[in-house]
Image (tube, rainbow, N blue to C red):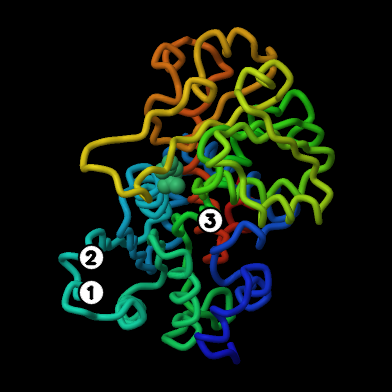
Amino acid sequence: MDLSLQDFLSLPEAERVPYIKDHAILYAQQFDRESLDYHCRLADTCRKMHKTGEGADFLSSLLRHWTALNFFVQPSSRTFLSFNSAQSMLGMRRASVRDINISSMSKGETLTDSIRTFISYVDLVVMRHGDSDAGAVAYWIATKARKIVINGEERPIPIVSGGSGTKQHPTQSLLDIYTLEKSFEQIGGIDGKTIMLVGDLKRGRTVRSLSYLMKNYNGVELVFAAPEQYQMQDDILHFLDTHHVPWRMVDSLSAAVADVDAIYMTRIQDEWDDLAPGTHEAASDEFCFKLEHLRNMKPTACLLHPLPKRDEIEEAVDYADDDRVVYWRQERNGMWMRVAIIAKLFGVGEAILERA
Ligand code: NCD
């Protein structure tokens, strides 16, 4: 990296991508169709392989000599646990930092010094941070610090975003793609499908990352269903226009529920607001998914949610015993996708595919 940190951070995301190569996962714009298909195939292979004792033993023999740090200083259940489980399935040693108040950052240590320190001890940093640029900072530092050798190539230790501010959640969007591909297995995959994103599209990093990935599929259309103040932002709309991905906005879920192939619900991201402790903004009725919507969905459609959810999905839908409700499967798919992501980063993807 021949740029100063300041110059690197002054670049828009898309222009940072060539500097990142495949040494970190920070932005959904890093993925092309080939790499998405590869990750889905690898995730599926790991899922099947882990079903047998020999397969599970093989997986857990692969990365035994590497140590991962899960640096999560924003709340997390699924992303933290699924990364942790994925690392353990691959045999990695694991450490975590989850609370700034009991790390040296509470003594005034800068993020850059903290990351530089982590790199002294571990070989992979998965991080969730409220600052959208924290991952880019970590990557820049990794290019200046201790290197590791993977398949004969010396490289910076991998930095993986597990959610960056309100902007990006690239590994979530990979697991969403995996879930959509699996749901559409019998009907030609994601190509040609219409996908409705519902809820807080302005501050929801999952829907932003997923929207970027849609440029990789043919004939996909996006429908944005959100209260006006939470509608999808211009930077994403502009990206979609540039890549010829058609989109439209609707002012209620009902307006398109019967026409679309997938519905992706999200929660109002009110942790960014100044609310009284313990209070939450209720989802407005037009953007709540109810049993009647399930009845109106296409027979081949699917209902996703990155979780955690609140009142935006009626509780009865959870246990409606309907195969179109896939968010619990989506949650588990996240673990397999994260096995695939780490395996690929550490150069063992091919060994897994060859053994299968
Ligand atoms: C999401 C996140 O953190 O952005 N959660 C997750 O990782 N599955 C969605 C959310 O918090 O609403």
Q: Which mark is residue 105?
A: 1
Mark with earlier residue (2, 1): 2
At label 3, counting other C-alpha atoms closer than 10 Å, the crowd grade (few under 14, some 14-19, many 20 or more) is: many
Q: Which mark is residue 168?
A: 3
Image location of residue 166, percent across then percent down: 48, 54
Mark with earlier residue (1, 3): 1
Left or right? Give the position of 68 relative to 6.
left
- Give the CA distance from mark 2 to mark 3: 21 Å
- Give the CA distance from mark 2 to mark 1: 6 Å
The amino acid on which the numbered mark 3 sits, given as a three-letter code, is Gln
The amino acid on which the numbered mark 1 sits, given as a three-letter code, is Met
Q: Secondary structure at mark 3?
A: loop
Whether residue 54 appears in this view of the structure is: no
User: Relative to residue 179, is residue 140 depicted above or below?
Assistant: below
Left or right? Give the position of 263 relative to 166.
right
Residue identified by numbered label 2: 100
Camera-side residue of 3 and 83: 3
Q: Quadrant of the N terminus?
A: bottom right
Quadrant position of residue 238: bottom right
User: Relative to residue 159, is residue 317 depicted above or below?
Assistant: above
Mark 2 within 8 Å of ligand 1, using the beta carbon = no
Q: Which mark is residue 39?
A: none
Q: Secondary structure at mark 1?
A: helix
User: Relative to residue 264, is residue 174 depicted above or below?
Assistant: below
Q: Are marks 2 and 1 in contact (CB under 8 Å)?
A: yes
Rendered residue at 34%/73% (across/down): 122
Q: Secondary structure at mark 2?
A: helix
Q: Quadrant of the C terminus?
A: top right
- Give the CA distance from mark 1 to mark 3: 23 Å
Image location of residue 208, percent across then percent down: 59, 49
Rendered residue at 52%/66% (across/down): 346
Mark with earlier residue (2, 3): 2
